[in-house]
């Protein structure tokens, strides 16, 4: 079902809308106050940040690419919301504390030291604040083709560059990383199974059924994870 906030993104794939819906529903279902303020870390061109701001959330978006940030700024809803700036997920600084939520979607696999990003996120979230992380399953169908096969075979016999993913997460790896950083995992959902394949990606019906199937499959077989987390209260 198409939702009004979908108008503020240029997504076309069902799995991307599924991810966006998970993020927005997680915030709405697990927040205990109005006028929420959040950060989208690794925001790209704002495909998550801008829909969130359309719902009334005060949003900041950070991305390492100046080109992405300039694109995102051109799509802003109002003059001051969202606020975008260039920054590195492992070294950013934010003149804000006690944020209500942070989004880190399809970012941690690009970082050499993802624990640094999680530590910075923890420092700007209020106690019990929400962290929503999405990552590829490093041993699922997508990563086996787009990362492992690409790096070990395809990039060596063609002009295709190696994958930009520098970290590979199993479900247990990412769970341990998140929990060691001081977060409680509240919910884990699946992304898709094989709807990323070029031969099927143009079929909306197949992609819908593929995402539905992924919800029924064991976690080891899916292409990615959507994770809702909460910052544990700091000890007095």
Image (cartoon, rainbow, N blue to C red):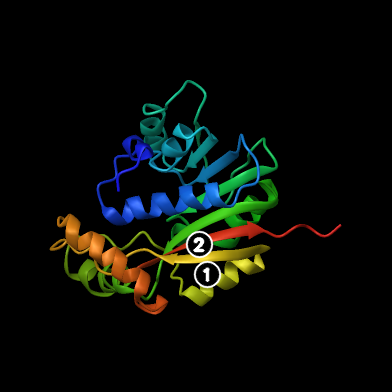
Q: How many marks?
A: 2
Label 2 Cα crowd, 10 Å radius (few <14 / some 14-19 / many 20+): many
Q: Can residue 212 be seen in this view?
A: yes
Residue drawn at x 33%, y 52% is: 16
Residue 174: give its label: 1
Label 1 Cα crowd, 10 Å radius (few <14 / some 14-19 / many 20+): many
Q: Is mark 2 on a helix, strand or loop?
A: strand
User: Residue beneath label 2, please?
Assistant: 227
Residue drawn at x 59%, y 72% is: 176
The quadrant of the rendering that contains the C terminus is: bottom right
x then y, percent, for residue 94: 63, 38
x then y, percent, for residue 180: 65, 68
Position of residue 129 relative to residue 73, above or below, is below
x then y, percent, for residue 154: 21, 69
Residue drawn at x 16%, y 65% is: 158
Residue occupying the far top of the picture: 79
Q: Is residue 89 visible?
A: no
x then y, percent, for residue 103: 52, 49
**Residue sitting nearer the eye, 213 or 123:** 213
Q: How far apart are marks 2 and 1 (CA)?
A: 10 Å
Please give left or right for residue 11 compared with residue 184 in the image.
left
Please give left or right for residue 97 compared with residue 112 in the image.
right
Q: Mark 2 or mark 1: which comes first in sequence?
A: 1
Residue occupying the far right of the picture: 236
Cβ–Cβ below 8 Å for labels 2 and 1?
Answer: yes
Q: What element carries label 1?
A: helix
**Mark nearer the viewer, 2 or 1:** 2
Q: In which quarter of the image is residue 162?
A: bottom left
Residue 236: give its label: none
**Residue sitting nearer the eye, 110 or 84:** 84
Residue drawn at x 59%, y 52% is: 30
């Amino acid at each position: 079902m198409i939702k009004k906030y979908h108008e503020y993104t240029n997504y076309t794939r069902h799995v991307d809308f599924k991810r966006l819906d998970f993020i927005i529903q997680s915030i709405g279902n697990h927040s205990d106050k109005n006028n929420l303020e959040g950060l989208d870390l690794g925001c790209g061109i704002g495909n998550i940040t801008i829909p969130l701001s359309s719902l009334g959330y005060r949003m900041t978006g950070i991305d390492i690419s100046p080109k992405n940030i300039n694109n995102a700024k051109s799509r802003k809803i109002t003059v001051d919301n969202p606020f975008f700036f260039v920054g590195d997920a492992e070294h950013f600084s934010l003149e804000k504390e006690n944020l209500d939520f942070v989004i880190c979607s399809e970012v941690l696999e690009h970082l050499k030291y993802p624990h640094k990003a999680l530590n910075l996120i923890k420092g700007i979230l209020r106690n019990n604040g929400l962290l929503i992380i999405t990552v590829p399953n490093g041993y699922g169908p997508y990563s086996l083709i787009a990362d492992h096969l690409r790096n070990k075979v395809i990039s060596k016999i063609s002009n295709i560059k190696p994958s930009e993913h520098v970290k590979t997460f199993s479900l247990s790896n990412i769970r341990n990383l998140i929990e060691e950083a001081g977060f409680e995992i509240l919910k884990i959902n699946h992304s898709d199974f094989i709807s990323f394949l070029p031969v099927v990606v143009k079929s909306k019906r197949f992609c819908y059924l593929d995402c539905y199937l992924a919800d029924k499959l064991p976690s080891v077989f899916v292409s990615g994870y959507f994770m809702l987390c909460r910052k544990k209260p700091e000890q007095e």
